[in-house]
Image (cartoon, rainbow, N blue to C red):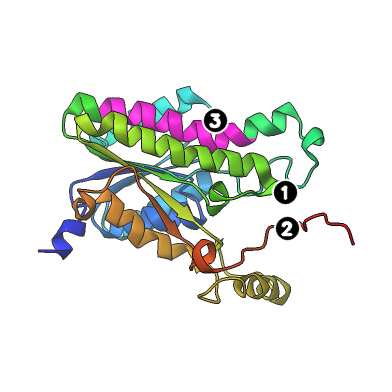
């Protein structure tokens, strides 16, 4: 009975940023739990590969190239889901720019374009997708689930990537507001907050050493792996979390609670 509540049979999910890394693994996990999936990102070849992997699991999937910075493209994404499957039950907004525009620059050297692009991809996209997906869920009258992906940097300062940290903090606040606004329509909204998670295996020994050097900062003494977000996404998408909304779920190996995460800068003090 308990495990049945984690099943997503008959559900339809839209996943942005589904072409690789965290998004791809969460899309696959939703499919393994029984959901049909619409895979979205700007890179058509990557999301088609994810869709093909989902079909190999026995589920239906389509790939919809989407630039989530454009609200009309987000509207079209949800419409493509409705056209293909007739419904949307789960909206998982994962698309983001980890290597944020303007990263590492002084505050006064970050351009308006860099700032806007970082905010658009990491924050506005979640709003655009939630707005159009919730409308479709409400029209259908059967509720639904919104899952946003933020970052541990949204819970602390990050001078080298302050625009990114700002956007991800706002995603957490957006999620709480969505939960409060949409509960009367039986729509739940929650947020996944990853720490350092390896998007892929290291490409060489040098990169492996860098990963190992980061891992020492965390109580678990390792970086997370992309697949580990999948079970959490399934939980939040399923009836197993039917009494959970407006929450942020940190998955970071204890980095924020008991570790000393690297911040990429040193405090300026007098010698």
Inter-mark Cα distance, 2 to 3: 28 Å
Majority secondary structure in the magenta region: helix
Query: How much space separates mark 1 and mark 2, taking CA atoms?
Result: 7 Å
Where is mark 1, residue-wise? 160
* Front label number (2 vs 3): 2
Q: Residue at x 41, y 32 (%)?
A: 129
Q: Are marks 1 and 3 in contact (CB under 8 Å)?
A: no
Find disc 3 in the rendering and name its residue: 69
Query: What residue is drawn where x is 44% and y is 28%?
Result: 128
The reply to whether residue 194 is in sight is yes
Q: Is residue 60 visible?
A: no
Most distant residue in the left direction: 1
Q: Earlier in the sequence, mark 2 or mark 3?
A: 3
Q: CA distance from mark 1 to mark 3?
A: 23 Å
Q: Is residue 133 magenta?
A: yes
Tell me if residue 240 comes above or below residue 105 in the rendering. below
Q: Quadrant of the C terminus?
A: bottom right
Question: How many numbered circles are shown?
Answer: 3
Nearest to N terminus: mark 1 or mark 2:
1
Question: What element does badge 1 sit on?
Answer: helix
User: In terms of sequence position, does the residue under pointer 1 or pointer 3 come before the other?
Assistant: 3
> Residue 151's spot in the image, x, y percent?
52, 50
SS for callout 2: loop
Crowdedness of circle 3 by 10 Å Cα count: few (<14), some, many (20+)? many
Q: Is residue 246 magenta?
A: no
Q: Tell me if residue 236 comes above or below residue 227 in the rendering.
A: above
| Quadrant location of the N terminus in the rendered image | bottom left
Label 3 secondary element: loop
The segment highlighted magenta reads 118-136
Q: Quadrant of residue 121?
A: top right
């Amino acid at each position: 009975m308990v495990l049945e509540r984690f099943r997503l049979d008959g559900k339809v999910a839209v996943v942005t940023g589904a072409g690789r890394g965290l998004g791809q693994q969460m899309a696959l996990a939703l499919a393994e739990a029984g959901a049909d999936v619409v895979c979205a990102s700007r890179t058509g070849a990557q999301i088609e590969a994810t869709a093909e992997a989902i079909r190999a699991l026995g589920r239906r999937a389509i790939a919809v190239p989407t630039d989530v910075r454009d609200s009309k493209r987000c509207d079209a994404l949800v419409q493509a889901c409705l056209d293909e499957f007739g419904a949307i039950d789960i909206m998982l907004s994962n698309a983001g720019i980890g290597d944020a525009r303007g990263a590492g620059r002084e505050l006064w050297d970050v351009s308006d374009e860099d700032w806007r692009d970082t905010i658009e991809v990491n924050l506005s996209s979640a709003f655009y997708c939630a707005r159009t997906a919730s409308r479709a869920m409400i029209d259908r009258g059967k509720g639904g689930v919104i899952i946003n992906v933020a970052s541990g940097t949204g819970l602390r300062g990050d001078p080298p990537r302050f625009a990114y940290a700002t956007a991800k903090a706002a995603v957490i606040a957006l999620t709480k507001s969505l939960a409060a606004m949409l509960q009367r329509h039986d729509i739940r909204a929650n947020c996944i907050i990853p720490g350092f998670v390896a998007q892929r295996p290291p490409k060489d020994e040098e990169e492996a050493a860098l990963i190992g050097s980061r891992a020492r900062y965390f109580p678990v003494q390792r970086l997370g792996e992309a697949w580990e977000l999948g079970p959490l996404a399934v939980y939040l998408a399923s009836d197993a979390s039917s009494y959970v909304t407006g929450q942020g779920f940190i998955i970071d190996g204890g980095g924020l609670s008991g570790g000393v995460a690297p911040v990429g800068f040193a405090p300026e003090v007098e010698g």
